[in-house]
Amino acid sequence: MGVGLGGVTRKPVLVLMGSGETSPTMVSVHRELVDRLRPKSAVLLDTPYGFQENVAEISARAQAYFERSVGLTVDVPPGLRGLAEIGAGDDPRHDGARARAADVGLAAVRGADWLFAGPGSPTYALTQWRGGPVGDALADHVRTGRAALVFASAAACTLGAYALPVYEIYKAGARPHWLKGLDVLGRLGLKVAMIPHYDNAEGGTHDTRYCYLGERRLRVLERELPDDAAVLGLDEHTAAVMDVGRGLVEVRGRGSMTVRRSGESVVVPSGERLALTDLRAMVRGEAARRAPVPPRDGDTEAVPPPATLRDTVVGCERRFEAGVREGDAEALVRAVLDIDAAVAEWAGDTEEDEGGTDWARDVMRSLVVRLGQTAGRGLADPRDALAPTVEPLIRVRAELRRTGSYSLADVVRDALKAAGVEVRDTPDGTHWQPDAT
């Protein structure tokens, strides 16, 4: 038991996300946690991406996301980037200033009620956190339950006993190997290597599952894990909410959580809950997954997650095509405007996978061009243009049929067909329409 928000005693809550942590797909998870815990002090750790030149921009986008979409004001403490280098410089005054800033930042971390960390480099984050005051603070929060931890993507990688140096392996060609992780999840009885982006498919023709490892390299790494450890995988746009007080793990989002040992996987799909004790047993290889835990009275029913940006844009393209076929100008305009709205909604996503918003803008531009072309041709019903010519011929054909001149009537029908007009004789009269082929 620990002292939690506002002095209230509660057990730890840890939320892991495979990706999409600042996208619309995870809004409901963030909102429900914030509504439940009412944090008075919310902190964003910028360390995982602290080596990037646009670190301030990434932080600002994340802060705007939480303010706009979740209603949560998030602070970015100073002095937490480059902690490993403090004391190594030539100018003691400079190092002293950095140390004082770090003290302020660490005080914010230890006093926080809610902590978030996301994309970047697991290796860089571990260099700053492991064996240092931030890593100790994270472990203490999980031990005491004071702050809820929401860790995603690269930051989530660091929380296991073993961490994946994804960039070194995937981008720089290093041999597959584990780094020593923070083992924060070990305090929940989970000895794991945490792998986000578990179902990644960006490679197209080559295997980029398992956070860009692929099956071959994951098998190599599995052999280096001890018998009582496992891989804990989270699909993209998927969260695992670990609630120690309730003894439950709930999977939310678009994908699944996977426990994998020696190539054998147990998959827990989105919408299911299981006991934390069962998850521990699965990690140790002592039991298969038991039946899902039913919702408790008063629990909020799981709602389908919102579509990804790609899903939304593809759906808009289909609606645009239908609008062209049906001559619905309003549908064409609405499809383009909906893509524009989706781009704005996803602009705060700090993940960099798939070039999402750039791709969506390209699609939108192509639809705008087609919209202009369609406007030039006109969306009028082609029947209106053909009717002055076709209707008199239909009347002539009807008169020929009435007088028994069927061969001449067939000549008229064939001529209309050659001109792209389909004629159908039905019990209630003759009908025609432009040939769809």
Image: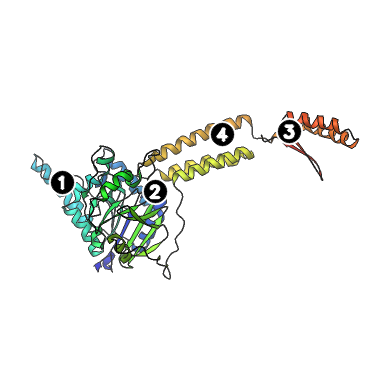
Front position in the image: 203 or 75: 203
- Looking at the image, residue 338 sits to the left or right of residue 271; the answer is right
Q: Give the residue type that dot 3 points to.
A: Val
Q: Give the residue type that dot 4 points to.
A: Leu
In which quadrant is the N terminus drawn? bottom left
- Element assignment for label 1: helix
- Element assignment for label 4: helix
Q: Say whether marks 1 and 2 touch (CB < 8 Å).
A: no
How crowded pointer 2 is (Cα within 10 Å; few <14, some 14-19, many 20+) is rated as: many
Residue 303 at x, y = what percent?
Answer: 46, 58
Q: Give the residue type that dot 2 points to.
A: Ser
Residue 405 at x, y = what percent?
Answer: 88, 32
Ranked by sequence position, the earlier of labels 1 and 3 is 1
Res 348 → quadrant? top left
Q: Say whether marks 1 and 3 touch (CB < 8 Å).
A: no
Ranked by sequence position, the earlier of labels 1 and 2 is 2
* Residue occupying the point 89% across, 37% down: 402
Residue 428 at x, y = what percent?
Answer: 81, 45
Q: Residue 62 carries which label?
A: none
Ranked by sequence position, the earlier of labels 2 and 3 is 2
How far, Cα to Cα, is label 1 from label 3?
78 Å
How crowded pointer 1 is (Cα within 10 Å; few <14, some 14-19, many 20+) is rated as: some
- Element assignment for label 2: loop
Residue matched to label 3: 421
Residue matched to label 1: 84
How far, Cα to Cα, is label 1 from label 2?
31 Å
- Element assignment for label 3: strand
Residue matched to label 4: 371
How far, Cα to Cα, is label 2 from label 3?
50 Å
How far, Cα to Cα, is label 4 from label 3?
27 Å
Ranked by sequence position, the earlier of labels 4 and 1 is 1
